[in-house]
Amino acid sequence: MDFVRQNRPVTLALIGGKGHYEAVVKPAMNAERSLWIATANLKELMVEDERARPGRRRTTSRQGEFRSMLSVLAEQVARGLEVRILHASPPSRPFREDLRRLPGLRRPPRGAFELRLCPRVHFKAVIVDGAMLYLGSANWTGAGLGAKGEGRRNFELGLTSRDDPLLDEVQAYFDRIWRGAECSACKLRGLCPKPLDK
């Protein structure tokens, strides 16, 4: 999987800090067909409850105007969204607890919701509907994706693009790891809790 592609012009947007929330989290919350996430760290992500619209009553969680991104994903999966999350370390305790409370993600009625752990994953990518790509430094965490308040966010930089060849390359890379195509030659296989090729 070592490569360097030929230089070519690509339209990109540079984002930093809270820009990640606007450019990555919001599109993920509005995904219609698929959402692929690659991250080293996976934590519960609290998002603004955007269900309130003029003339429509706001329904919120006990935490006020915020709710877990997992609850958003549960609604999307019920409508047929495919969610793949490739991560390097075990999810945080709050993430696991929230996941346990959402039976629609443990046994999706339509669509799919899958988590796969690979200790070698360190790239950060979010692919929304196969049409929007984020590549950057931010993990799938509130501090990384600008969901935390000012002074509590990480210093992150990333790029977004809708470039089809770039999307194809990153999706192929993600899918190769997802399918376990690299597992047989991996020197960490003995430490891996569940190799992806099994």
Image (cartoon, rainbow, N blue to C red):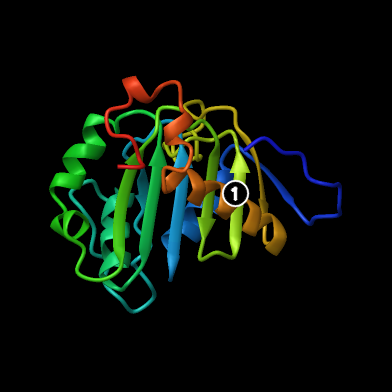
Height in image: 176 above or below 54? above
68 sits to left or right of 101 = right
Q: Position of residue 153 (x, y in %)?
A: 50, 30
Height in image: 77 above or below 148? below
Which of 194/153 is in front?
Answer: 194
Which of 123/173 is in front?
Answer: 173
Q: Amino acid at mark 1?
A: Tyr
4 sits to left or right of 195 = right
Height in image: 90 above or below 15? above
Picture residue at 18% right of the left edge, 54% below the top: 106
What residue does disc 1 label?
A: 134
Say few, some or many: other residues with alpha carbon within 10 Å of mark 1 (under 14 / 14 to 19 / 20 or more).
Answer: many
Picture residue at 48% right of the left edge, 37% below the top: 182
Picture residue at 51% right of the left edge, 30% below the top: 122
Q: Is residue 21 visible?
A: no
Q: Position of residue 110 (x, y in %)?
A: 25, 71
